[in-house]
């Protein structure tokens, strides 16, 4: 098996595979699919065996953290582990809804300590503030300071944020985040300029939604309308739609990794195979961006 390409994650000292794993898929019912412990263990070990080394999870994702801890904590040295903070701390409640995110010192500190226990690890490579808080929300009740103190203690290696418009520009200006997780895909281009700003400032860029959440494969909704309006099937010819979407994301000059979730090892292998073909040819990428920007 060929090695997955890697990128240095911004100003961190870590190289991450350009395909990461979004572990929200492991959250379980009722918000997600009802999967067995055996199935979750199978996909987690499969992704490590296939060479994926970036795993993104959250307190919000139901059973996800606990399943990662049970299934692959013995392989901890093989993966970069990212979770989130500011989330409600009741694991049972998170199975039914995300709840309100607050950024007090206690919520942040207690959340990280809970994640460490659930993930069966002594440290998290990255903790991200969830739900794109404003700078004021991050600082007025000590949440940012608490996460920085956990970093000083060695429980957290790097600090990040899951950022979106309208707060993303101000988050970048704070200059404190090692990593930004930003939604972006061929069918969601609105964060592209700010993503470049964050990258140029030295931060790592983790793209979520880079597979367009099914996008053209679903043949329904706004994404499908955009795809048709841009004439994308004619442009890509015989290329598989999902391959195009993944390679479009990979073509971004600012990407370090993109997190994609699946419960099926065969789908994981298909995603790897698509990315191993490399970025899109420059002429195809440029024309696709022109068409899609006009249609969105």
Image (tube, grey):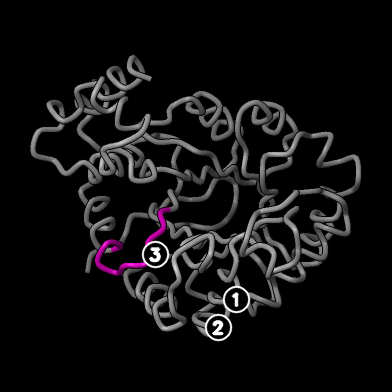
Q: Classify 10 Å Cα crowding around label 3: few (below 14), some (14-19), many (20 and above).
A: many
The quarter of the rendered structure image containing the N terminus is bottom left
- In the image, is 258 to the left or to the right of 98? left
Quadrant showing the C terminus: top left
Residue at 43%, 27% (x, y): give it: 189
Please tell me whether residue 108 is drawn above or below residue 215 in the rendered image.
below
Which numbered marker is on residue 180?
none
- Mark 3 lies on a secondary structure that is loop
Report the Cα–Cα distance between label 2 and label 1: 6 Å
Which residue corresponds to mark 2? 70
Residue at 32% from the left image edge and 70% from the top image edge? 50
On the rendered structure, is 56 left or right of 293?
A: right
Mark 2–mark 3 Cα distance, whole angstroms, equals 18 Å
- Residue 42 appears in the figure: yes
Q: Which mark is residue 52?
A: 3
Quarter of the view holding residue 173: top right
Q: Which residue has dot 1 on it? A: 66
Report how far apart the C-alphas of labels 1 and 3 lie in the structure: 19 Å
- Where, by quadrant of the figure, is residue 20 drawn? bottom left
């Amino acid at each position: 098996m060929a090695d997955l390409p890697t990128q240095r994650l911004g100003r961190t000292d870590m190289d991450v595979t350009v395909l990461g794993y979004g572990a929200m898929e492991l959250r379980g019912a009722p918000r997600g699919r009802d999967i067995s412990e055996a199935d979750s263990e199978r996909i987690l070990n499969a992704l490590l065996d296939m060479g994926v080394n970036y795993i993104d999870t959250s307190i919000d994702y139901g059973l996800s953290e606990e399943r990662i801890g049970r299934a692959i904590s013995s392989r901890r040295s093989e993966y970069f582990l990212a979770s989130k903070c500011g989330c409600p701390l009741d694991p049972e409640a998170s199975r039914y809804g995300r709840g309100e995110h607050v950024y007090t010192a206690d919520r942040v500190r207690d959340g990280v300590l809970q994640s460490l226990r659930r993930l069966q690890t002594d440290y998290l490579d990255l903790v991200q503030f969830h739900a794109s808080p404003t700078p004021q929300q991050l600082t007025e009740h000590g949440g940012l300071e608490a996460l920085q103190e956990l970093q000083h203690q060695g429980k957290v290696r790097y600090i990040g944020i899951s950022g979106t418009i309208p707060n993303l520009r101000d988050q970048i200006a704070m200059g404190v985040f090692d990593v930004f997780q930003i939604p972006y895909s061929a069918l969601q281009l609105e964060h592209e300029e700010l993503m470049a700003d964050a990258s140029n400032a030295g931060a790592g860029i983790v793209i979520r939604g880079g597979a367009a959440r099914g996008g053209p494969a679903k043949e329904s909704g706004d994404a499908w309308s955009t795809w048709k309006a841009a004439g994308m099937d004619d442009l890509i010819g015989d290329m598989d739609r999902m391959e195009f979407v993944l390679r479009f994301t990979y073509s971004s000059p600012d990407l370090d990794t993109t997190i994609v979730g699946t419960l099926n090892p065969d789908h994981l292998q298909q995603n790897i195979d698509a990315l191993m073909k490399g970025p899109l040819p420059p002429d195809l990428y440029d024309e696709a961006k022109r068409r899609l920007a006009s249609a969105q």
